[in-house]
Amino acid sequence: MASHIRDMTAGRPLPLLLRFALPLMLGNMFQQLYTVVDTMVVGQALGVNALAALGASDWLNWMVLGAVQGLTQGFSILMAQEFGARRQESLRTAVGNAVTLSAISAVLLTTVSLLAARPLLVLLQTPAEILHDSLTYLYIMYGAIPVVFTYNLLASTLRSLGDSRTPLLAMIVASFLNIGLDLLFVLVFHWGIAGAAFATVLAQVAASGFCFAQLRRIPLLRLQKHHFRLQGPVAKRLLVLGSPMGLQNAVIAVGGIIVQSVVNGFGVLFIAGYTATNKLFGLLEIAASSYGYGMTTYVGQNLGAGRIERIRAGMKAALGLAAVTSLIIAAAMLVFGRDILSLFISGTPQEVARTLDIAYYYLALMAVCLPVLYLLHVLRASIQGMGNTVLPMASGAAEFVMRVAGAPLLPLWLGEVGIFYTEVAAWFGANLILIPSWIAVLRRAQPFVSQQELTDGGESPLREKS
């Protein structure tokens, strides 16, 4: 078995989570690096309008990306449970069926997204001067949805086996390639915002290839043709786990799209400032999402192994890590945030000053409330690892309600900056659902029983020999 695979059913939870999460953090940092470079190149080389065009398409792009990430992460929950229970054949079947379902989903989602891109941008009242660039960016990103599916499924599969190192290395490769291609396509070839999009797509192709090469070296995942044939109970279980997570992310994104439509009415400079901070948002939640992925794998494997007490211990460790990390990052953003934001913005002195004031106000607000976001990530991921993806979807619905209700109302009371408070209000709303949900799910927790065990009348051992 490949050395990067990690059994999280034994050992102290805190070191296990740290060893798993640190490579993910580094990988996310590199991923954010090329996202930030995209934004810097666009903002500095192409101007405020191009930066605003990127921002106007952000939530629409995230709606699709979030759906893909949620679906594939949901698939990985079953993989983690089967791996924790040492059911190798069931694991292979889960992986093969996940590949088939992902391929079907990629075709459907690509078709729908390409057809809906222009109507959605028009519906969001995207300013005429940035509509063409926003549409160009979306067409390229939507056309690459199969690539996005491929990378996310491969990375999720590796993480379900406790391998967070390979996705890190893949992101390092992708980041440096993306930065180089950004500079080449935008500054040398003068392809504009399309160049930034093509650079991102090609970087994801490279990351997918890297993960695939590693997966092929894992004997445990040597699949045969019959593993890819959809098996009713397995495919249903995968969809039950993945669909609510994909829908949850899509619903959250729709709330963001509605907020974006309000932001679009405040003018190009406001859109640019809002976009600059949103690009830094990924840096704020790097550790949060990493701890979340760690807890999904940790909880899933330990549920499969029937070790409920280890799940409780893991939650305590994760909450401590989340609290300390969020406070450190928040302090750094409050101190250095304005200087970092200035790297994204160009234009006349008046344009730069106005845009920077808008961006830093938003950044400072999110930094102060960052512990709330970190709590959200840990709780949601842990509940998902327990095999319950419906309650996290309900928390996504709560985020949606807070954004949709706050977007038109808060600016009336607080002025333009009121739109920023809808984001942190959404975090609080989600936690109101997640905190009691975690308590209830943990109280009802039972060791994971696979479909194969049910078929065999419960005679299969919970943990087979590897």
Image: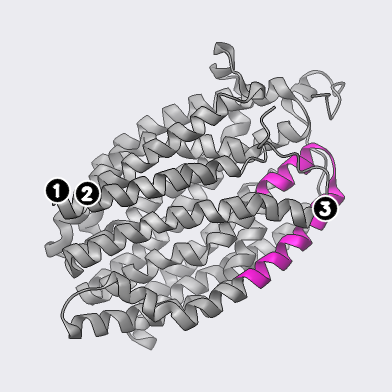
Residue type, numbered disc 1: Phe
Q: Which residue is mark 2?
A: 184
Mark 2 and mark 1 in contact? Answer it, CB < 8 Å.
yes
Q: Residue at x 47, y 34 (%)?
A: 210
Q: Give above or below for 335 relative to 79.
A: below
Question: Callout 2: few (<14), some (14-19), or many (20+) C-alpha neighbours within 10 Å?
Answer: some
Q: How is the image coloured?
A: one colour
Mark 2 and mark 3 in contact? Answer it, CB < 8 Å.
no
Q: Give above or below for 64 relative to 255.
A: above
**Residue 12, which numbered label?**
3
The residue closer to the viewer here, 173 or 345, is: 173
Q: What is the C-alpha distance between the residues marked 1 and 3?
A: 52 Å
Residue type, numbered disc 2: Leu
Q: Could you say whether the residue bearing mark 3 is in a helix, strand or loop?
A: loop
Q: Which residue is mark 1?
A: 189
Indicate which disc, 2 or 1, sits on the residue closer to the N terminus. 2
